[in-house]
Image (cartoon, helix red, strand yellow):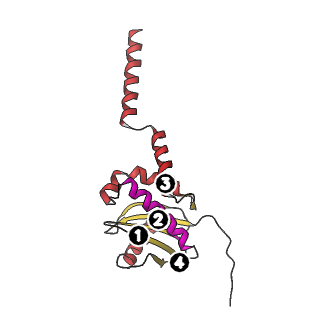
């Protein structure tokens, strides 16, 4: 029997995709530029992945030498993709962390429209969960705390924009008085 050794790697996630119930991309993040060198390959893979999983009742599928774990909802399909030798439980923990954190953000109303309205939070969640293919965090509570802190740090709220406008108006007023 032939044995082969694989070099260990921290880069376990090749991609995270969210598709709608028609197979169209809503959000995706690819971490492997060798397997997916261009948008064309990404789209072809997503089409193939959707056609393979839309009628399946499993949570794990092997496709094109990759392992994909997925979860479907009302009109959303969530996928986490790793190599064919990747531990499915690790990929599933990434999927569950993303899904649970996002469901708390969307107040358990996991639909396409809600996802569009909170796209910036989704992108922050993806960045907090996986960085360059390396799993950083999967606990939904920790993820939500980090995203909430980052959202506050960004300073782009209606109140902060109003404050910037007010400060600019006051400084203009002072410069006109001088």
* Mark 4 vs mark 2, CA separation in Å: 23 Å
Select label 3 or label 4 by which is in front: 3
Q: From the image, which quarter does the C terminus lie in?
A: top left
Does 96 appear in magenta? yes
Select label 4 or label 1 by which is in front: 1
Q: Specify few, some or many for label 4: CA neighbours under 10 Å numbering under 14, 14-19, or 20 or more.
A: few
Give the numbered dot on residue 65. Answer: 4
Mark 1, secondary structure of its residue: strand
Instruction: Specify the segment rendered in magenta.
Output: 81-108
Q: Residue furthest top?
A: 178
Question: Which x, y percent locates residue 120?
Answer: 41, 50
On screen, residue 155 above or below 69: above
Magenta stretch mostly in which secondary structure? helix
* Mark 3 vs mark 2, CA separation in Å: 12 Å
| Residue at the disc numbered 3 | 141
Q: Specify few, some or many for label 2: CA neighbours under 10 Å numbering under 14, 14-19, or 20 or more.
A: some
| Residue at the disc numbered 1 | 71
Q: From the image, which quarter does the N terminus lie in?
A: bottom right
The reply to whether the C-beta atoms of the residues labelled 3 and 2 are less than 8 Å apart is no
Q: Earlier in the sequence, mark 1 or mark 3?
A: 1
| Residue at the disc numbered 2 | 96
Q: Earlier in the sequence, mark 1 or mark 2?
A: 1
Does 136 appear in magenta? no
Q: Earlier in the sequence, mark 3 or mark 2?
A: 2
Mark 2, secondary structure of its residue: helix
The reply to whether the C-beta atoms of the residues labelled 1 and 2 are less than 8 Å apart is yes
**Left or right, residue 109 beside residue 36:** left
Quarter of the rendering containing residue 39: bottom left
């Amino acid at each position: 029997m032939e044995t082969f050794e694989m070099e260990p790697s921290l880069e376990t996630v090749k991609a995270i995709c969210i598709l709608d119930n028609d197979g169209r991309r809503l959000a995706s993040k690819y971490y492997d530029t060798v397997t997916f060198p261009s948008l064309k390959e990404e789209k072809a893979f997503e089409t193939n992945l959707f056609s393979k999983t839309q009628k399946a009742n499993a949570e794990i599928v092997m496709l094109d030498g990759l392992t994909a774990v997925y979860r479907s909802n009302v009109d959303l399909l969530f996928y986490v993709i790793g190599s064919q030798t990747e531990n499915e439980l690790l990929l599933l923990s990434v999927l569950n962390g993303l899904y649970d954190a996002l469901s708390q953000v969307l107040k358990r109303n996991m639909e396409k429209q809600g996802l569009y309205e909170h796209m910036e939070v989704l992108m922050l969640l993806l960045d907090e969960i996986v960085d360059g293919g390396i799993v950083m965090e999967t606990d939904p509570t920790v993820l939500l705390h980090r995203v909430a802190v980052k959202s506050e740090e960004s300073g782009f709220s209606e109140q902060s924009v109003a404050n910037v406008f007010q400060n600019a108006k006051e400084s203009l007023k002072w410069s006109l008085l001088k």
